[in-house]
Amino acid sequence: NAGVTQTPKFRILKIGQSMTLQCAQDMNHNYMYWYRQDPGMGLKLIYYSVGAGITDKGEVPNGYNVSRSTTEDFPLRLELAAPSQTSVYFCATASGQVGNTEAFFGQGTRLTVV
Amino acid sequence: QKEVEQDPGPLSVPEGAIVSLNCTYSNSAFQYFMWYRQYSRKGPELLMYTYSSGNKEDGRFTAQVDKSSKYISLFIRDSQPSDSATYLCAMTKGRVSNYKLTFGKGTLLTVNP
């Protein structure tokens, strides 16, 4: 039972390149989220999904895209990387059970755009 | 005014000290309040969870929520070097908001042996 798995752990991109951050979960959770964490800034929500085929924007969606074709996977796409996207990215899941708001986080992807 | 305010510290205390961490918030719709602990280069992990106002104790940790003041606290008794981490407060409106979490900036705590 791996929980939430993110790949890659580290990546350096050049400005204008694109990449996909992968997130996979084996917890059978419907809710999945992508957050970014900048130094001293807490976590900000980029996109989220309440189930396969359903996605919605969070607080800071510009420059990113997502898809959710299965319950298990929730990839985050950067199309034209910019230095402002240098950050640590966390994928998280939640069960959605009534009264249970715990979110489970992956170990993060540390992205540098140069 | 930010939805959630948290003093980023850093906070440095000697081993055995009592630590108090706090957050204030502005949106009265928040119902669920959490504290996450994040070790360096790791993902956040849930430490304490409280629904609505009140206290909750778990070993050396006590979480308090005062909804009338829009103020939440985490107390750590007999702090240990292993408690050194960033502590993030988080809150959500629950199902109506699809369990989206709003985080404070995090407080970096160092407990010195």
Image (cartoon, rainbow, N blue to C red):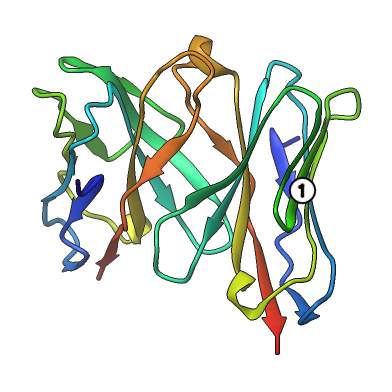
In-front residue for pair A36/B96: B96
Question: What is the quadrant of the C terminus of chain B in the image?
Answer: bottom right
Question: What is the quadrant of the N terminus of chain B in the image?
Answer: top right
Residue drawn where x is 68% and y is 76% of the image: B80
User: Where B12 sits versus B99, above or below?
Assistant: below
Identify the image quadrant of residue B70. top right
Residue drawn where x is 31% and y is 57% of the image: A108
Which x, y percent locates residue B36?
Answer: 56, 49
Q: How many marks?
A: 1
User: Which residue appears farthest toward the top when viewing the image?
Assistant: B96
Residue underneath mark 1: B62
Residue drawn where x is 15% and y is 60% of the image: A8
User: Which residue appears farthest toward the front when viewing the image?
Assistant: B59
In screen coordinates, is A98 left or right of B42? right
Residue drawn where x is 48% and y is 26% of the image: B100
In screen coordinates, is A30 left or right of A99? left
Q: Label 1: how many residues lie within 10 Å, few (<14), some (14-19) or many (20+)?
A: some
Q: Secondary structure at mark 1?
A: strand
In-front residue for pair B110/A84: B110
In-front residue for pair B56/B89: B56
In-front residue for pair B25/B16: B16
Identify the image quadrant of residue A94. top left
Which x, y percent locates residue A84?
Answer: 37, 56
Which x, y percent locates residue B17?
Answer: 84, 74
| Residue type at numbered disc 1 | Thr
Give the chain letter at badge 1.
Answer: B
Which x, y percent locates residue A36?
Answer: 40, 49
User: Which residue appears farthest toward the right when viewing the image?
Assistant: B69
